[in-house]
Image (cartoon, rainbow, N blue to C red):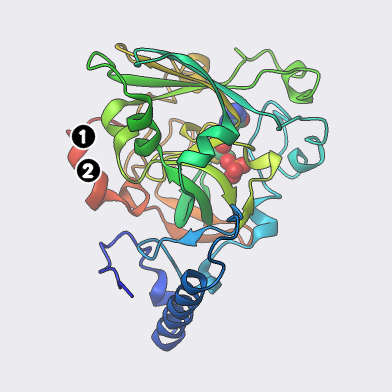
Amino acid sequence: MLIRKSEGWEIPEREVTPEAVYWNRRQILQSAGLLAASSLVGQPKPLYPAVKNEEFTVPAASLTPDWAASGYNNFYEFDPNGKETVKDLVDKFVISPWQIQVSGLVKEPQMYDLDDLLKKLPLQERVYRFRCVERWAMVVPWTGFPLASLIKLLEPKASAKYLRFVTASRPSEMPGMKKAPYPWPYFEGLRMDEAMHPLTMVVTGMYGKPLPKQNGAPVRIVTPWKYGYKSIKSIVNIEFRTSEPPTFWNKLISSEYGFYSNVEPKKPHPRWSQAVEQMIPTMERRPTMQYNGYEKFVAGMYNGKEF
Ligand SMILES: Nc1nc2c(c(=O)[nH]1)N[C@H]1C(S)=C(S)[C@@H](COP(=O)(O)O)O[C@H]1N2
Ligand SMILES: [Mo]
């Protein structure tokens, strides 16, 4: 079996668990991987749980519990005023079938069925840290694939320099949309090199299961070195374009939420410090990490001013 050398993507949280526990778990996972490969030949492969990417794992004890990550959410389309309430407001939201409009500067702009795309893009599981601009943070095993794989499949034109993403807009299914006069639908964007960065994931699941609706089912983005609001949920449109796209939070309060929104402990939010984060559900305080711990991998994309 090929044992991949760690590239350093792993969250250095082996410190919080005794080394022996950590290495035992790795051995168990590796032998489980061997079993999975040798059996089930010729069976249709279920999507979940997906293969664990060994470059992005942590000891189970340092993961945020599933109930906390799926019970404490920011999803303003359902509730602009609450986090624990979101999960109870998603029942009416229809997530299957799901189509994504690909538009702008690509070989063939067209509507794609998510299920068809998933047949071409194998899923994997990766554990990432996640940091909301409001300071709460978590460690989550996401299932999905690199956005770069989708971008390559779509064949953007050389003139495409940015991507714009748009969330579904269905006020009859999303009760929060009527509660606040926000510039719906939610929209976000990435520069092409950020979108192509191997850390940027298209996510369809977490904790080895399909994504709960409150976490952005059936498909969202996760950019772990940026504040959480860049990780747009329930995407229905991806546009390839030449100019920097406007973003929802920047449009609402441009002095507080820039386009890049990279995690930077030394740059306070105008209304609070960003030096410390609090892990849900315990609210244990930890120092915020530069680029949320992904500095080594992403700092080279920036000149130090993009925050
Ligand atoms: N469409 C949409 N996407 C969104 C949001 C939102 O309100 N609407 N909230 C963002 C914010 S502020 C955060 S912190 C994360 C929260 O993701 P989670 O609920 O899965 O933890 O989703 C982001 N994506
Ligand atoms: Mo957030």
Identify the residue at image location x=52%, y=52%.
142
Residue 133, visible in the rendered structure = no
Quarter of the view holding residue 30: bottom left
Identify the residue at image location x=39%, y=84%.
19
Q: Which residue carries the number 1 mark?
A: 302
Task: Say left or right for 14 vs 78.
Answer: left
Task: Say left or right for 57 vs 7.
Answer: right
Quarter of the view holding residue 192: top left
Residue at the outermost front position? 42
Distance from disc 2 to disc 1, alpha carbons, whole Å, reads 6 Å
- Mark 2 secondary-structure assignment: helix
Q: Are marks 2 and 1 in contact (CB under 8 Å)?
A: yes
Q: From the top left corner, tell me how far across and down residue 248 is, in percent.
A: 51, 19
Within 10 Å of the Cα at label 2, are there few (<14), some (14-19), or many (20+) other Cα atoms? some
Quarter of the view holding residue 115: top right
Residue 17 sits above or below residue 100 on the image: below
Residue 299's tag is 2
Q: Nearer the viewer, residue 61 or 263?
A: 61
Q: Which quarter of the figure is the N terminus placed in?
A: bottom left
Q: From the top left corner, tell me how far across and down residue 81 is, in percent.
A: 72, 31
Residue 90's tag is none
- Which quarter is ligand 1 in? top right
Identify the residue at image location x=70%, y=58%.
67
Identify the residue at image location x=71%, y=50%.
71
Q: Which quarter of the figure is the C terminus placed in?
A: top left
Residue 149 sits above or below residue 29 on the image: above
Question: Given the image, on which type of amino acid does mark 1 rest?
Answer: Tyr
Q: From the top left corner, tell me how far across and down residue 235 is, in percent.
A: 56, 27
Question: Given the image, on which type of amino acid does mark 2 rest?
Answer: Ala
Residue 109 sits above or below residue 257 on the image: above
Residue 13 sits above or below residue 56 on the image: below
